[in-house]
């Protein structure tokens, strides 16, 4: 069954992202999603390796997906404030975005 949430956020806790701080990134997402009252709109999921280890901590936001790289706690807060709360991709943190996400978007 598919999620009813508006967004799904996948935070990699794999063997390369983990030592780069992805548990702190996940905790920052949890805290900021709660602080902003976005719990109904966002499903937060810890994942295994996504094959982009050199970009860790690696985060994907769906729909898209929009792939964010090197996401520390500050970046996680910015993604929550801008992408998840205001529907605006944080372009400076994007390492991969499919054209279907950006075409026709405001
Ligand atoms: S360990 Fe995170 S992408 Fe590989």
Image (cartoon, rainbow, N blue to C red):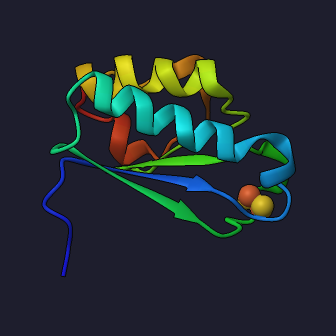
Res 96 visible: no
Query: Foreground residue, 32 or 54?
Result: 32
Q: Number of callouts in the render? A: 0
- Indicate whether 47 appears above or below 71: below
For the C terminus, which image quadrant? top left
Res 91 visible: yes
Q: Is residue 96 left or right of residue 38?
A: right
Query: Foreground residue, 77 or 86?
Result: 77
Query: Foreground residue, 81 or 64?
Result: 81
Residue 31 location, x and y as percent?
Answer: 42, 31
Q: Is residue 30 left or right of residue 42?
A: right
Residue 1 location, x and y as percent?
Answer: 18, 82
- Indicate whether 100 appears above or below 48: above
Q: Is residue 17 left or right of residue 101?
A: right
Q: Quadrant of residue 3?
A: bottom left
Residue 11 location, x and y as percent?
Answer: 56, 52
Quadrant hosting ligand 1: bottom right
Q: Quadrant of residue 26?
A: top right
Residue pictured at 31% horizontal, 23% vertical: 35
Considering every residue shown, the one lying at the far bottom of the view is 1
- Indicate whether 81 appears above or below 56: above
Residue 47 location, x and y as percent?
Answer: 57, 66
Q: Is residue 15 left or right of residue 106?
A: right
Residue pictured at 78% horizontal, 53% vertical: 18
Residue pictured at 68% horizontal, 28% vertical: 72
- Indicate whether 52 appears above or below 96: below
């Amino acid at each position: 069954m598919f999620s009813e949430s508006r967004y799904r956020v996948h935070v990699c806790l794999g063997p390369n992202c983990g030592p780069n701080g992805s548990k702190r990134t996940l905790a920052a997402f949890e805290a900021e999603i709660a602080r902003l009252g976005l719990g109904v709109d966002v499903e937060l999921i810890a994942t295994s390796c996504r094959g982009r280890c050199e970009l860790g901590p690696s985060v994907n936001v769906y729909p898209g997906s929009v792939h964010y790289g090197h996401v520390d706690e500050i970046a996680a807060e910015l993604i929550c404030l801008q992408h998840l709360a205001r529907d605006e991709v944080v372009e400076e943190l994007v390492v991969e975005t499919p054209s279907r996400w950006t075409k026709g978007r405001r």
